[in-house]
Amino acid sequence: MKLPPFEYACPTSISEAVALLASHDGEAKPLAGGQSLVPMLAFRVAAPSLLVDLRKLADLRQIEITADGVTLGAMVRWREILDDTRLATAHPLLVAAVEHVAHYQIRNRGTVGGSMAHADPAAEMPGVAVTCEAQIAVTGKAGTRVIAASDFFVGPLMTVLKPDEIITEIRLPAWPAKRRFGFQEFARRRGDFALAAAAAFYDEDNGRARNAHVGVIGVADRPLRLPSVEAVINGQKIDDVLIAKAEAATSAGVDPADDIHASGAYRKALAGVMVERALKAAVA
Amino acid sequence: MAVKFEVNGKAVEIEVEPRLTLADCLRHHLRLTGTHVGCEHGVCGACTVLVNGAAVRSCLMLAVQAEGANVVTVEGLSRDEGLTPLQASFRKHHALQCGFCTPGMITTAHALLSEEPDCDADRVREVLSGNLCRCTGYISIVEAVLDARSAYKRGGTGA
Ligand SMILES: Cc1cc2nc3c(=O)[nH]c(=O)nc-3n(C[C@H](O)[C@H](O)[C@H](O)COP(=O)(O)OP(=O)(O)OC[C@H]3O[C@@H](n4cnc5c(N)ncnc54)[C@H](O)[C@@H]3O)c2cc1C
Ligand code: FES
Ligand code: FES
């Protein structure tokens, strides 16, 4: 369908963008890559009165890598993550996950901030953020605040963002060089949203896993971290027996609903298999 | 709103509603009907054009967002009246039947080959996974793209 009518503004500073968002009684929306918002407009499930295009906010375009970790500006595109060779060591899990995001043309436009704000329960970036304990910096009329990824998502396409707030940065904690990890996803066709996917990583002490982090997407109304699976892994040697236990704990730890794409029972089993494969990739 | 950008090397300046997509702007206002619109919500790839060299879906971009950009449509890829090596390769390999998906396939493959003239069949399939074709079964399209690689290695632009 053709898009519903709206006004359009293209501010050149964050404060101007926030002021514009605040001026429309909650009816204004930021526009980043448009790869989720424009389809929502075309389906007429969204009908904002004003779109505030963030494309001129150059400050939001940076990828910063320091000893503290990786900071992604909200307007960093998927393509820029895949093209940044530093990230292969600075955050290989991020790169592995983003390789599964959408298609070539969409990756040329879509942004990390847009994905976080859109909060699709099957989207990779929110899953990485929750699994890695990312911090999300946002700016609104009331000033700036930093939100833990685990507190950010509240339901399908729902976050704690206020209508006048924009995401400015996503901060991922530092990634030790020797960390073991895997990211595995299953989708019907390449580029489709995941039916389920898993991210897993751990550090090693004398051949035993510690600091395990396991997260899944596509199996709940938001991305999940699975402490019950992490507890199975921590302190253990990661072998086939342990991986089978982690797989069982994953399936036991999620309760997906039936939908048109797959039954809940299928997704429950699939989540376990994704964690199994992610751990096998981590060991390899 | 007034918007100024370049299409196929020519400067354009037109007055559009903010809700007009770049795809509709190209087709209805600029009469460049080579860009096809299949789904209008980002899943089929028929509307792919190049914006500052990058392949993007023109149904998911507003015309006003193209301000200052350099846009190339399928019409802008060929010079004179002849076919480019990529287009000739599509003809040679029967990589089109109805032709609806073809402009999107050509613009996407052109962007890919311009950046990665050494890409393999897996990469071609990965990149074209965002372009739907209801006729060919894709095999001939992948063959056509692979066969056109040599032109991009030599000439750089495939032209
Ligand atoms: C065919 C297709 C397949 C796709 N497959 C996948 C997939 O497999 N995995 C995946 O993760 N995604 C997928 N996507 C979505 C894509 O990754 C989007 O790019 C992404 O979800 C949204 O990013 P955007 O920059 O395009 O945001 P937009 O579409 O511009 O915005 C999305 C929402 O976020 C808000 N927003 C944007 N930026 C900010 C900000 N900085 N602060 C606050 N709010 C903001 C907007 O107001 C809007 O509500 C797919 C999209 C399509 C069309
Ligand atoms: S018309 Fe744009 S992707 Fe289908
Ligand atoms: S040739 Fe008919 S859709 Fe591709």
Image (spheres, coloured by chain):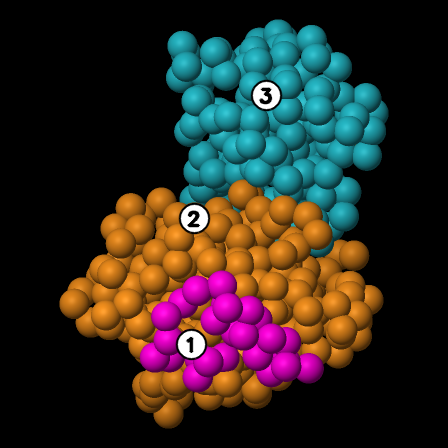
Q: Colour of chain A?
A: orange
For this orientation, the residue located farthest to the left is A67
Point out residue A29 in the picture as x, y percentages from the top left corner.
Answer: 55, 74
Cα–Cα gap, marks 2 and 3: 22 Å
Check residue A13 in the rendering and tell me which mark sits there, or answer none: none
Q: Residues within 10 Å of mark 2 (few under 14, many from 20)?
A: some
Q: Would residue B70 be visible to someone looking at this image?
A: no
Cα–Cα gap, marks 3 and 1: 46 Å
From the viewer's perspective, is residue A59 above or below residue A17?
above
Closer mark to the observer between disc 1 and disc 2: 1
Q: Nearer the viewer, residue A243 or B79?
A: A243
Which chain is indicated by disc 1?
A
Q: Colour of chain B?
A: cyan
Q: Mark 3 — residue? A: B145
Q: Mark 1 — residue? A: A233
Question: Callout 2: helix, strand or loop?
Answer: helix
For this orientation, the residue located farthest to the bottom is A142
Residue A178 placement, left or right of B73: left
Point out residue B19 in the picture as x, y percentages from the top left corner.
Answer: 65, 58
The residue depicted at 64 percent of the width and 19 percent of the height is B143
Which chain is indicated by disc 3?
B
Which chain is indicated by disc 2?
A
Q: What residue type is labelled 1?
A: Ile
Q: How crowded is mark 1: few (under 14 residues within 10 Å), some or many (20 or more)?
A: many
Point out residue A162 in the picture as x, y percentages from the top left corner.
Answer: 50, 87
Q: Which amino acid does label 2 sit on?
A: Arg
Q: Mark 2 — residue? A: A79
Discs 2 and 3 carry the same chain letter = no
User: Bounds of the magenta span?
Assistant: A229-255
